[in-house]
Image (cartoon, rainbow, N blue to C red):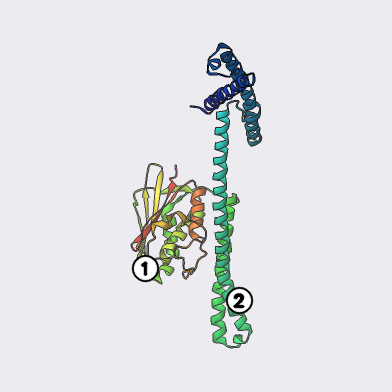
Amino acid sequence: MSIRQKIRFQSLFYSIVISLVICLIASATIGEFSIESIFSLNFFLLFILCSIVVYAIGAFFVKFFLYNSVRVISDEIFQSDVDSTITTNMEDLLKKIRQYDDDQKSEISEMKKQETFRREFIGNLAHELKTPLFTSESYILTLLDGAIDDDEVNKKYLKIAGKAIHRLNLIVKDLDLITKIESGESEIQRTDFDIINLAQNTLEMLEIRASKKNIKLLLEFNDKLPLRVNADNEKIQQVLTNLVENSIKYGKENGTTELVIQELTENKIIVRVTDNGLGIEEKHFNRLFERFYRVDQSGSRKGGGSGLGLAIVKHIMDAHDEKIYIESEFGVGSEFSFTLEKSLQ
């Protein structure tokens, strides 16, 4: 039964009850109240007349008070939407109001999530900046207090302060890069280039860093395939660098990091960066590409870096309209992979 039908049924029921009461009171007032008079023709005609009048008055109040009040609310809700039409059906009005209420709840929920993310981001940023700032300040003040006169000490302290300042520079540079990508200021400059050559250059640049943990860097590809891609050369190198650096940072001593490039479809290739490092628990997957997010919640970032590497990877791949994927098993290793469009030439 619709809402309109329910209202009509209730109005009719109350009209009958009220009319019956009115007729009984009228009969008692004129002194003709008896069982016989209730079943008389005059009583029946009076009852019918009263029912019609009471129902008409009830319908008037429902239409011009209840319905018009709901319509005023509906008008206020939808007055900002020039394309919306005002329905004369009360059930439709109530549906729209419920929909509006649901939309408002969803919007409030999303705003709360954004506010939580904003607070976390500001807190994480403050933490990331505080550590190198405090480190560099402490060692520089120690030097100014007299340690600068000791050649061995001042050289050591200046190196530590220099590393802290370098870390600050990394954070600011990476934040600037993310901001430019998000705002469209740093646009994707697509060119055709050899992804194999780019991968080889990237691994060569990171060989020294990998050797400190005795990690082997391996490159696997099918040299029979023309693996030229259409993408932003510089930004894809940034993606490869960040993923391989991440693999080295969290890799095991004497481990391996393998970069595999394969043809995926007729017009797509897939790049995989695989390691046998610490691995990541699945509960972290959804937040892994957030800025400054740590799998290790202890607060330390002993491996250095800006804490923005994976966030930059995600932004660059989004700008290319491509996806970044992760497969990982805690204690076994991880694999990050992404797709690229093959060159048409």
* Position in image of residue 307 (x %, y %): 51, 63
* Figure check: 302 above or below 231: below
Q: Report the residue at 60% width, 25% height from top.
A: 88
Q: Position of residue 240 (x, y in %)?
A: 45, 57
Name the quadrant of the C terminus: top left
Q: Residue furthest top?
A: 41
Q: Amino acid at mark 1?
A: Lys
Q: Is residue 4 above or below residue 195?
A: above
Q: Label 2 crowding class (10 Å Cα cut-off): few <14, some 14-19, many 20+?
A: some
The residue nearer to you, when weighing 159 against 344, is 159
Closest to the observer, 21 or 118:
21
Disc 1 or 2, which lies upstream in sequence? Answer: 2
Say above or below: 87 vs 168.
Answer: above
Out of 43 and 73, give the one closest to the viewer: 43
Q: Which mark is residue 252?
A: 1
> What is the secondary structure assignment of the residue under circle 1?
loop
The amino acid on which the numbered mark 2 sits, given as a three-letter code, is Glu
Q: Residue at left 60%, top 51%?
A: 185
Q: CA distance from mark 1 to mark 2?
A: 33 Å
Residue at position x 47%, y 63% from top? 294
Whether the residues at callouts 1 and 2 have beta carbons within 8 Å, the answer is no
Q: Is residue 187 visible?
A: no
Number of disc labels:
2
SS type, badge 2: helix
Give the labeled residue for mark 2.
137
Q: Nearer the viewer, residue 276 or 111?
A: 111
Name the spot of residue 291 as percent of width and height, x first. 52, 59
Identify the residue shown where x is 41% and y is 45%: 268
Q: Mark on residue 195?
A: none
Residue 139 at least partly seen? yes
